[in-house]
Amino acid sequence: QVQLQESGPGLVKPSQTLSLTCIVSGGSISSGSFYWSWIRQPAGKGLEWIGRIYTSGSTNYNPSLKSRVTISVDTSKNQFSLKLTYVTAADTAVYYCAREISSSWLVWGQGTLVTVSS
Amino acid sequence: QSVLTQPPSVSAAPGQKVTISCSGSSSNIEKTYVSWYQQLPGTAPKLLIYDNNQRPSGIPDRFSGSKSGTSATLGITGLQTGDEADYYCAAWDSSLSAYVFGTGTKVTVL
């Protein structure tokens, strides 16, 4: 059974780059026809899709974040990553990684809180 | 940046039924599949419905989904205290080439 676990710094300074990794266990990130997504949620607010990557490396990003986001995959480490540049307080949120199939997300990580503050 | 509109809250007594609407447009709900998620406080969202009306394994048939035109609906029958949570719809938006979520609905069991 596939499980996802986010990892990365919980505190990032304004204007710096937020970097998170999602470690995939219980299955190969390369097997099956899955997209691997990042989704975030500011405290007390709704969900926001950040973007996704296919194991071939093709990506889709939220237009509102596209200029600052890069999602990559490392099949040798069975993980995928998120980089968000020039962060501000508005980027403070719980960040989730999730596996997409059939236009929905069945498998989710537990989420990791990233706070942007000096 | 929520493109899909949901009522902020719905409530009903235990055992009753609630419905949650998700209103979108011709570039999202009308054109593609809708999924629904339940989020209990402090936890990751949980998939309840995919492909408009399909339930993943383990989701009770008290939860149902439907779609008509540019709107979708989640129904919960036999309401239980454990159903108190936030619920979100989601769909791909072909104009944005991105997934969009609903604004979220808080379900309260009276």
Image (tube, coloured by chain):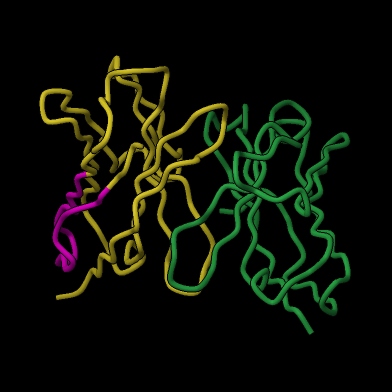
Chain colours: A yellow, B green
Residue shown at 52%/68% (left/top)?
A: A45
Identify the image quadrant of the N terminus of chain A: top left
Q: Position of residue B65 (x, y in %)?
A: 78, 44
Q: Quadrant of residue B18?
A: bottom right
Q: Quadrant of residue A114?
A: bottom left
Q: Nearer the viewer, residue B54 or A100?
A: B54
Q: Quadrant of residue B90?
A: top right
Residue B107 drawn above or below residue A108:
below
User: Is residue A33 toward the left or the right of residue A26 in the image?
Assistant: right
User: Is residue B72 toward the left or the right of residue B48 in the image?
Assistant: right
Q: What count of labels does the image hold?
A: 0
Residue shown at 83%/65% (left/top)?
A: B78
Q: Position of residue B77 (x, y in %)?
A: 84, 60
Identify the image quadrant of the C terminus of chain A: bottom left
Q: Residue furthest left?
A: A76
Magenta stretch: includes residue A6: yes
Q: Position of residue B98 (x, y in %)?
A: 52, 34
Q: Nearer the viewer, residue B57 or A88?
A: B57
Q: Position of residue B96 (x, y in %)?
A: 56, 33
Residue shown at 57%/47% (left/top)?
A: B47
Magenta stretch: includes residue B78: no
User: Is residue A57 toward the left or the right of residue B3 in the image?
Assistant: left
Residue shown at 71%/71% (left/top)?
A: B107
Q: Which residues are magenta?
A: A5-21
